[in-house]
Amino acid sequence: MEPAVITKTKPAARVRKTISDKWYAFWLIAPAMAIILFFALVPLFYAVDVSFRKADLTMGGLQGWVGLNNYRTVLHEAKFWSTVVTTLKFTFFAILVEMGLGIFIAFLIYGATWGKGIIRSLVILPLATAPAVTGLFWRYLYDTQFGPFNYFISALGLPWHPNWLGDIKLGMTSLIIFDTWLWVPFVALIVLAGLQSLPKEPYEAAELDGASSFRVLRTLTLPMLSPVLTLVFILRTIDLLRLYDSVATLTRSGPGDTTETLTYYLYRQGLVFFRMDYASTMALLFMFAVIVASGFALRPLLARLAARAGSR
Amino acid sequence: MLQQKSSKASVILRYAVIALVLVAILFPIVWLILTSFKPADDIMVYPPHFIFKPTIDNYIYVLQKANFLQFIGNTLLDAGVSTIFVIVLSSLAAYSFARYNPGGGNILFFILTTKMFPAIAVVLPYFLIFKTIGDTPIGKFLQVGLDKPGALIISYTMFNLPFAIWLMVSFFQDIPRELEDSARLDGYNRLQVLRRVVLPLAAPGIAVTAIFCLIFSWNEFLFAYVLTRTDARTITVGVESFFTLRGILWGPVAAAATISVVPMLIFVLILQRYMVRGLTFGAVRG
């Protein structure tokens, strides 16, 4: 810690000498750090404490210590693992669709000759909306009787009458379509910014060499774009794993339990069944997994991007 | 660069596909706003009506019933106060990180880690803690407890602080250090430099960060849902109050949703130059 290093300058502070830069920097971050430490760590330790106790809010609230019992119960529960699988399945397919479509749209706008600004401003609009609110409204869009989606399908003459939110084969797809609508703009916008900030010189050289456009894409564009693509991928993955709002308002874990993600199960355990002990245990396991994953993936990447931004 | 010699056909094809993408992206928002102005008879019909006589009945219904005005007030209060807290705390911290880099990046990354906490994992302990605090005299006095605005203000401050610090570090890094050095040579002390030179230069960045924080708090759902019941409810949760036992009142739902969505659309349009930077915590400076 810093204080040990500082002690020798401390007595001199009396002699109208101002505090050292190190202490100045420390005092500037102190209020924010105090808040972050307090409001992040207190709940964390509280959750750890609860996870080692019996805590059934319908029966006497916080009770005695039970050691690792909650962890044993949770890890042996089939339901826990099935919601983990649902979460991973959703994340996998959603990231595939969102990245694919987002990159496609970014290239589409990048190559546009006019109206780029307006197209970009329109594309980002879904990002402004509250997922919980638009998720609720999408129940109307998906409605089998009056919903415009099914109207368009039949207007195109297709003999298909999907029950978006009621068919157990379609529930997950409907959720992914909604999430894609909401978040494709995020992928497209950032990839587009990445494309626009690429240096021009390598392309001029490639053109002189007569390289094919596919070769240019594979050997120039994609490698130079990869930090941005990785960042988008990681940020989206973290968000998809944590997804809650749209499950809560659009599908409500249904039809059946086909869209019951870990987050939704956690919510039900804790605040519907009031088994805070199981819920806290799962929350900690989940948090640990997300943080470890994001820590390993995100940190080196952010350092790389910061170095690049600094060199410009 | 990639398509140097694009033929006329490929330009047309490109714009056709762009038009298709735009329709898909904008349709749900346009339909939401249209539905909010539809009379009840034009909503639950097949085929859907594209032409109708607009009415503001749904808005009148929403604003009169179900204490929706109070929800709007709560949302403004929570978002506004938490944003003020966040901006004061984060601008000082971000300046320090940008200039002096305390902790050599470790503290800064720790801050980002707290942002990666899944909200659902945080909300359970928050629920228990606010339940306990709410019953104490201090909790009652400060309005911190379940179904009290203080609980959401604290939650949103905590939520947005890591984001705001990261974003603002990138703005402070954009301010040339030479300006500060020359101000120091002119006899300003460090605090004067911060107040008279750095903060005015950082004002646009601070404003951008504040708008982002407002949007995030305004749109937040889970904490508002779990930590409030009636008095401190916010708009995002309140929209659901038009899912009644007699059926879903889609007109009022659409009107309430439009009230929630449209101000944020305007904010995002104002912010668009900074969207990329904001969404990537300052890592990509589009």
Image (tube, coloured by chain):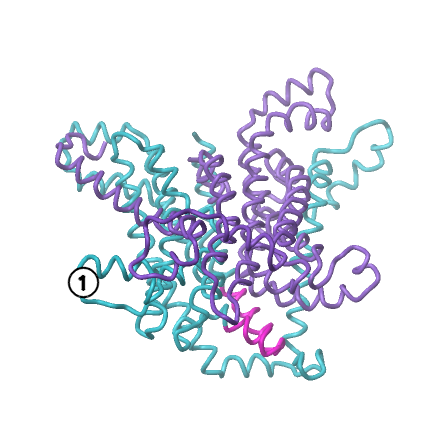
Chain colours: A cyan, B purple
Relative horizontal placement of residue B14, taking residue B126 as reference (left or right):
left
- Residue A276 highlighted magenta (yes or no): yes
- The N terminus of chain B lies in which quarter of the figure? top left
Name the residue rendered at 43%, 36% in the picture: A308
Majority SS type along the magenta span: helix
Q: Position of residue B82 (x, y in %)?
A: 66, 47
Relative horizontal placement of residue B83, taking residue B274 as reference (left or right):
right
Q: Nearer the viewer, residue A245 or A25?
A: A245
Name the residue rendered at 81%, 28% in the picture: A17
Q: Position of residue A230 (x, y in %)?
A: 38, 49
Circle 1 residues within 10 Å: few <14, some 14–19, many ≥20:
few
Q: Secondary structure at mark 1?
A: loop
Q: Nearer the viewer, residue B221 or A284?
A: B221
Q: Quadrant of residue B42?
A: bottom left
User: What range is drawn magenta here?
Assistant: A265-289
Q: In the figure, B201 relative to A61: above or below? A: above
Q: Nearer the viewer, residue A282 or A200?
A: A282
Q: Position of residue B135 (x, y in %)?
A: 79, 67
Name the residue rendered at 19%, 57% in the picture: A156
Chain under disc 1 = A
Relative horizontal placement of residue A25, taking residue A308 as reference (left or right):
right
Q: Amino acid at mark 1?
A: Leu
The residue that label 1 is drawn on is: A158
Q: In the figure, B204 relative to A98: above or below? A: above
Q: Nearer the viewer, residue B50 or B70?
A: B50
- The C terminus of chain B lies in which quarter of the figure? top left
